[in-house]
Amino acid sequence: MGQTLDSQFQQLCREKQLAVTHQRLVVYRALMQMCDHPSPEQIYERVRGELPSISLGTVYKTLHVFLAAGLIREVSPHHGSLRIEPNAEHHCHFFCLQCHTITDLEPSEVDVVPLMNSVPENFQVDRVSLEVRGVCGHCSGSFVSADA
Amino acid sequence: MGQTLDSQFQQLCREKQLAVTHQRLVVYRALMQMCDHPSPEQIYERVRGELPSISLGTVYKTLHVFLAAGLIREVSPHHGSLRIEPNAEHHCHFFCLQCHTITDLEPSEVDVVPLMNSVPENFQVDRVSLEVRGVCGHCSGSFVSADA
DNA sequence: TTCTGAAACAAGAACTACTCTCGTTTGATA
DNA sequence: TATCAAACGAGAGTAGTTCTTGTTTCAGAA
Ligand SMILES: [Mn+2]
Ligand SMILES: [Mn+2]
Ligand SMILES: [Zn+2]
Ligand SMILES: [Zn+2]
C-alpha cells in the first residue's frame, strides 16, 4: 500500500517535472493520510514523527510546490488579512488570486437551498457565501472600454 | 452631509449601547467613505490623515466592536492560516466560526450559472466557491446519535 | 558507478498581521 | 461638576509565514 502511494508520487513528480526528495515524499504520504483540512503546523507536527530533522520552512515550501503543481488545493482563500465590507447590500464577490483585490458582483439569483440541505441538522447556519476566484481584468491585462 | 452621517452614527451607538468616542466616529466616517474592501492597515492610514494620534490597536479594536455590533461585515473568511485540502473530490465546506474547523458537506446540486454570468467578461474564472459559515455541532453543544 | 551543477534542504533571522498589557484619558451618568 | 468604568495610546508580545545563508542531495552526464 505504501509502495503504491510512493510510486504514484514518483509518477506525479515525473509528470510535473519535480525532483523526488525524501522530504517531499514524506509530506505527500502524510497529506494523503490526513482526512481533514490540516494547517502547515499540523502537517509539520505529523511529519516530524517520521522525519524529526525536517524544518518548518521545508514544509511550507513543499506545500507551495504541491499547490502550484495541483497535487493539492487550499481550502482557505487566505487573503492574509482581515477585509472589511462597509456595503450592507447583499452581493457576491470576485477574489483576484494575483492582486488580492475583491470586486463586487452584480446581484444574481442562485438557489442555495440544496446546499443548505447538505448541512447536518445540529449545525447552526450563519450564512451561505458564494464567491468566484480567478484573475481580475486588471491582472489579466485586458480592459473593457467605458461604453462596452 | 457630514452632520447626518455623524448623527446616524450616534443613533446607531445608542441602539447598540456603544460609547460615542471621537476615534469611533472618525473610523466610522472613513469606512462609510471607502467604497472597496479595505484592510485594517488601509483604514488606519486613512484615519491618520484626520486624527494623527490614533493608534493601530484602536483601529483593530474599533473594527471588532463594529463587527460585533453588525455595523459592518467582514468579507474574508478564515484569513488566519493556510488550510490544505488533500481530498480531490468536488465538495463544499462548512466553516465553524467558533473552533475554525472545516467540515466537508455532502455533494449537492447548486446551479451557479447565474453567478458565473455576473462576472465581468474580461475576468478569468478559476473556480466558484460555495461555503456555509456558522457553528458546528460540536461547538453548539448538540450531538447526533450514531443512528440518527 | 562516479562526478557535477542546480535544486532542495535546515537553521534561524526577519517580517506581517494581529493581540495584549498597562498607565493615562475620556465620556456617560449622577 | 464629580465620579469611575470604559476607551485610548504606546509599545511589547505572539502566530503565521517568508527570506537568507551555508550545507546537502538529487538527476543527468560522463
Ligand atoms: Mn463588497
Ligand atoms: Mn474538504
Ligand atoms: Zn487582480
Ligand atoms: Zn466548531
Image: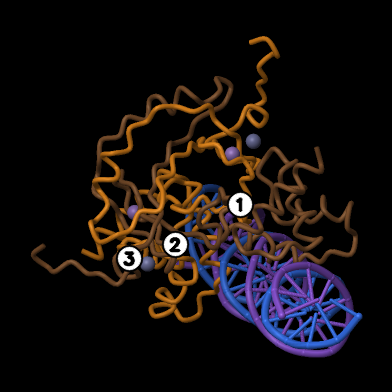
Chain colours: A orange, B brown, C purple, D blue
Cα distance in 3D space between marks 2 and 1: 18 Å
- For label 2, the SS is loop
Nearer the observer, B70 or B128: B70
| Picture disc at residue A34 | 3
Of discs 3 and 2, which sits in the foreground? 2
Q: Quadrant of the N terminus of chain A?
A: bottom left
* Chain of residue at mark 3: A
Report the side of B20 relative to A52 (left or right). Answer: right
**Ligand 1 appears in which quadrant?**
top right
| Picture disc at residue B71 | 1
Cα distance in 3D space between marks 3 and 2: 22 Å
Residue flagged by tag 3: what amino acid is it? Met
Q: Quadrant of the C terminus of chain A?
A: top right
Nearer the observer, C5 or C22: C22
> Within 8 Å of ligand 4, the CB of disc 2?
yes
- Residue at image position (68%, 39%) is B36
Residue flagged by tag 2: what amino acid is it? Leu
- Residue at image position (40%, 61%) is B96
